[in-house]
Amino acid sequence: MGKKPPSSDATATTPVTNAPARQRLFLALWPDADVRNRLQALGEQHVDSGRRTRPENLHATLAFLGAVDADTRACVERVAGNIDGQAFSVTLDCLEHRPRQAIVWAAASHVPAALTRLVEQLRAGLMQCRFEPERRPYHLHVTLARKVRRGQTAVAIDPIVWHIGKFVLVESRTYASGASYQVLRSWSLTGSESSQRS
Ligand code: ATP
Ligand code: MG
């Protein structure tokens, strides 16, 4: 978001606002092309009602931040940069329908210890940025479709093994056509290919 240059036109009627610009942000795990394609195929195979997530939007949220100002974003980026996390693999092995939220998601029945540690570190760090503590247990999931009113509660699927070597900061914007996400930054986890190269 660039800053507007001051206007030389004294009659200009630029609205004056002291409200700081805010961005709607979240921290997430972002699938590579192969995992993304497999998740898309899973949605196409199993979900025939509601609204499927657009393939480019598929992700697993680690921490939802909401609308934050620039100082808070900087704090979040400092916290993320100080994370000492290990790369890990997670196996998505179950498709679940959550009737209350009318959502279908792909989930992992086993959460690797490195993922639990990553989420714990992020949650502790975010409290330093004055976020409310998140006390709900972390449940990794990738939302495949919304507004799904009926469906089997849980279905075993061909496992999708997802190698995770980084986590990302994402901006969410909402349009009439739905949400659009942009990855703003990413941080490598130790032991990932990218961390070994650097
Ligand atoms: P939309 O809200 O426009 O329908 P969306 O839910 O995909 O689309 P966001 O609301 O910006 O977009 O959410 C971004 C991510 O954060 C999604 O994974 C969403 O499930 C998750 N999320 C949103 N709100 C919360 C919340 N209050 N607590 C936890 N996770 C949330
Ligand atoms: Mg939402």
Image: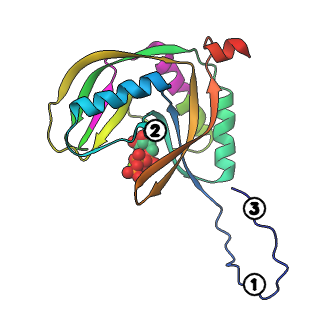
Q: Residue at x 14, y 31 (%)?
A: 152
Does label 3 point to a residue whose CB lies under 8 Å from ligand 1?
no
Which numbered circle lies on residue 12?
Answer: 1
User: Pointers 3 and 2 in contact (CB under 8 A)?
Assistant: no
Image coords of residue 145 (percent x, y): 29, 40
Q: Position of residue 160 (x, y in %)?
A: 36, 17
156 and 118: which one is in front? Answer: 156
Residue 81 is at least partly visible in this image: yes
Residue 139 visible: no
Q: Start and end of the magenta stretch?
A: 104-121
Q: Where, quadrant-wise, is the C terminus in this rendering?
A: top right
Rendered image: mark on residue 3: 3
Query: Which mark, by number, is residue 56?
Result: 2
Side of 97 where 93 appears, left or right:
right
The residue lying at 78 percent from left, 88 percent from top is 11
Could you tell whether 92 is left or right of 122 in the image? Answer: left
